[in-house]
Amino acid sequence: MADRLAAAAALRAAAPARPSPSARRAGPSSSAFFPSSSSSSAARRLVSLRAAPSQKAQAAGRGRSVRCMAAASDPAQLKAARQDIRELLKTTHCHPILVRLGWHDSGTYDRNIKDWPERGGANGSLRFDVELKHGANAGLVNALKLVQPIKDKYPTITYADLFQLASATAIEEAGGPKLPMKYGRVDVTGPEQCPPEGKLPDAGPSAPADHLRAVFYRMGLDDKEIVALSGAHTLGRSRPERSGWGKPETKYTKNGPGAPGGQSWTPEWLKFDNSYFKEIKEKRDQDLLVLPTDAALFEDPTFKVYAEQYASDQEAFFKDYAEAHAKLSSLGSKFDPGEGFSLDD
C-alpha cells in the first residue's frame, strides 16, 4: 500500500500544477507557532499548490473551501522523515518529549462528538500557538522546534502524521515494542480548529482513579489501556517549572543526558521497559517521582490487576502498550486514504 501511494504521489508531483485565480489572490494561511523561514515558506507554497483543486474537483465539491481539501502524507517522505527522527533521537535524547508531543495532539479526542475536527484527536492542531499555550502543553514548544526542520524538509507530510511518527519512533528507539501504526492523517488548517483547553489528564486531581477514567473513557479507552499507557512514564522527567510536580534535580537527572534537571519516574529514564510499574509498586527511592495518578494504579482494585501483571511480565506490558498506543494515535483522526496506510507494508 505504501509503495503504491508513493508512486501515485510521485506522479502527482511530476504533473504541472497551476494555481487557480482564487488561490493566487488568497493571502497567507494562518501561521503555525514558528516564524516563517525561507524553507518553510517554500514548503507552504508547495503544499498550497498541491492542495489546489482542479476544475473537476471544484465542480464535485460544489463550492467547498480549498482549506478543507487537505491531502494525505507522501509515504516515501514519511519513511525518510522516520530516519531523520532516528538520527535526531541519537543526538538530542529527546525521546520523552516526542512521545508527549504525539500523545497531547491525540489525547483531546471526544468520542461523543462526531464531526471532524471538532471531535479532537490527532490532527496536527498542536502546532498552533493557541493550543501550545494550554497549561498541559507547557514545554512542548521545544518539541515543535525539534521536528519543524523535518517538516520543512518533507513538505508533503502532515503535522498530524509527523507528530505520531515521532512519538512511535521514540518508543521503538528507546527499546520499546514495535507499534502497529498507520498513517495518512489529515491536518486541521487553522488555529480556530484547535480544541478547547482542559481535555488532557491532570497529574494531581482529588480523585485520581476517577479522573483517569473520566478522561480516557471520553476517548473510548478502557481500564487496561489506561494502565498500559501510563507505563510510558518509564521514559522522561517531570520539571517543576513546567508542571508544578517533581524535584528540580535528582541523582538520576543532574547530569542529563540533554538538559539536566527534573525528576524521573525510573532510574534509566531513556529506556522503555516495565520498570515504571516496579518502581511505583515498591516506592523505595525518594529520588523517583510518584504522582497521585501513578499511585492510583496500585490503589484502585481494577487498575491494580493490570499494574501487577505488567510489573512482573514485560512481554505482556509491551503487547498491551503497543495496541493501546496505536489506538490512541488514531482516535479522532481523519485519514486519506480512509483506511490509512502502514510504512511497513
Image (cartoon, rainbow, N blue to C red):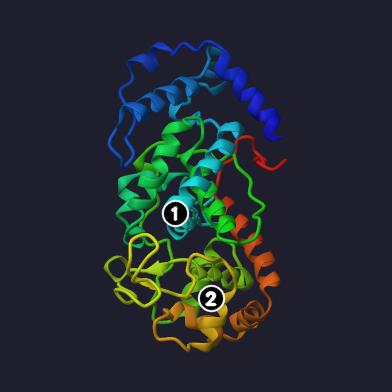
Q: Residue at 51%, 35% (x, y): give it.
A: 157
Q: Residue at 43%, 63% (x, y): give it.
A: 200
* Marker disc for residue 125: none
Residue 233: x percent and y percent? 49, 69
Amino acid type at mark 1: Leu
* Marker disc for residue 276: 2
CB under 8 Å between callouts 1 and 2?
no
Amino acid type at mark 2: Tyr
In-front residue for pair 65/69: 69
Residue with the mark numbered 1: 101
Give the spatial CA distance, label 1 vs label 2: 20 Å
In-front residue for pair 105/309: 309
Secondary element type, mark 2: helix
Q: Is residue 120 visible?
A: no
Residue 19: x percent and y percent? 44, 14
314 horizontally vs 86: left or right:
right
- Mark toward the start of the polypeptide (1 vs 2): 1
Q: Residue at 43%, 80% (x, y): give it.
A: 290
218 horizontally vs 46: left or right:
right
Q: Is residue 60 visible?
A: yes
339, above or below 258, in the image: above
Which numbered disc, 1 or 2, marks the residue closer to the eye?
2
In-front residue for pair 179/297: 179
Residue 42: x percent and y percent? 38, 24
The C terminus sits in image quarter:
top right
42, above or below 168, in the image: above
Residue 82: x percent and y percent? 55, 43
